[in-house]
Image (cartoon, helix red, strand yellow):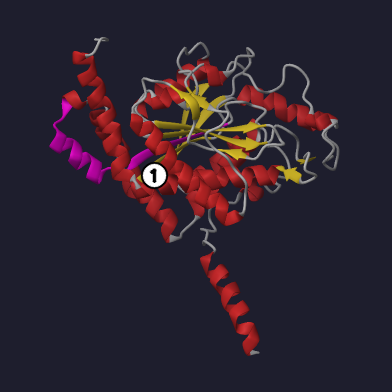
Amino acid sequence: MTRFMPLLFLICCRLAAQPAFNPSVPPPKQILGYELGNRFSSHNRLEQYLSAVRDAAQDRVRFVPYGETYEGRKLYLAILSSPENLSRLDEIKSHVHKLADPRTITDSEAEQIIKNSPAVVWLSYGVHGNEASSPEAALSVLYQLAARTDNETTSLLKNLVIIIDPLLNPDGHERYVNFQTVHSGTKPVEDKNADEHNEDWPSGRTNHYFFDLNRDWTWLTQKESQARIRTYQEWKPQVHVDFHEMSYNSSYFFFPAAKPINTNLPKSVIEWGQIYGKANAAAFDTMGWSYYSRESFDLLYPGYGDSWPSLSGAIGMTYEQAGGVGIRVKRADENILTLKDRIDRHTATSWATLKATELNREKRLRDFYSFFKEAINEGKSGPVR
């Protein structure tokens, strides 16, 4: 029997390491009727799950409708934090606004805010409606934050205010889900030539007016963008992540970004890209997943969901998962890529980003304050006034 003791010890340790969940918070399957990764979720199903979590986890979650699409679908934010933080959200917003306008406070007052305030992290999923794993991942992250009772999760909620936008582009996403419903059979087809992997025009990437919402952060030509930025400016988060998909034959991209880098960005943006990149890399290394950085996705154009937040004081980042296909597809290397694979990886980077922010909370808030302080000083003495 003794030769089995190391194996038993390993199994027990792994079981002990599994987080516990509050049974009163329903997992997605209980509301949706299927496991995440078995099908794509329509907007109304997302709404159903958001409502269920809101009702079951009122001590951790607030839901805020912040706008409406051209086709009449609601845009929502889930705001998650500790009960203490949720009771003083207006105060937290006020403190963030003071850090964002150094003319209103002294350095010592700013330092008090930095030491005593949670950092604000905004996670955006589904700006391209046919990059459809990210809204599913949003539900996974939402459930874990609302239901997990382990010390890691309660610590995250104590030190952060986490804002989840589960679906930025409901109209485009609905086109994609409808496409999948019409073109898929009872079992997923792995052949890339199958209908379910090849969308008809105009695809679900864009919104109702076929506008790419990930090109609109600066210009605000679409009502979804206008509503989002209005709410974004209320919170002024210190971290923003935009979750995407790319070629199904690729792997996973996270920051540091590729060149060119917008020259108006402070050097600290590059440093933070490395901090978050190392955190994500560690999470992927643990799972044996492949990834890359510093290629393909730059930080130059000001209208993206990474560059605009970075030009507004946050560290904005793009995360790209291989995908853009149906439930299961055979890649060129003969491996099968599943929707569940895509969800798991977006969930992993979401979690790693939150943990890295918590670990570096004061530094992130301090650099956020410095961003605006340096900008004001440059405005007084530089060529642009």
Front residue of 118 and 337:
337
Identity of the residue drawn at 75% across and 40% down: 327
x, y percent for residue 192: 82, 34
What span is in magenta?
104-125
Image vertical order of residue 355 relative to residue 368, above or below: below
Say left or right for 91 vs 271: left
Whether 303 is drawn above or below 287: the answer is above
The quadrant of the image that shows the C terminus is top left
| Spot occupied by residue 226 in the image (x, y as percentages of width and height) | 46, 17
Q: Is residue 110 one of those drawn in magenta?
A: yes
Measured along the vertical axis of the image, is residue 176 above or below residue 13? above
Say whether residue 330 is left or right of residue 139: right
Q: Residue sitting at 59 percent across and 15 percent down? A: 70
Q: Can residue 168 be seen in the rendering of this structure?
A: yes
Q: Can residue 60 be seen in this view?
A: no
Residue 123 appears left or right of 253: left
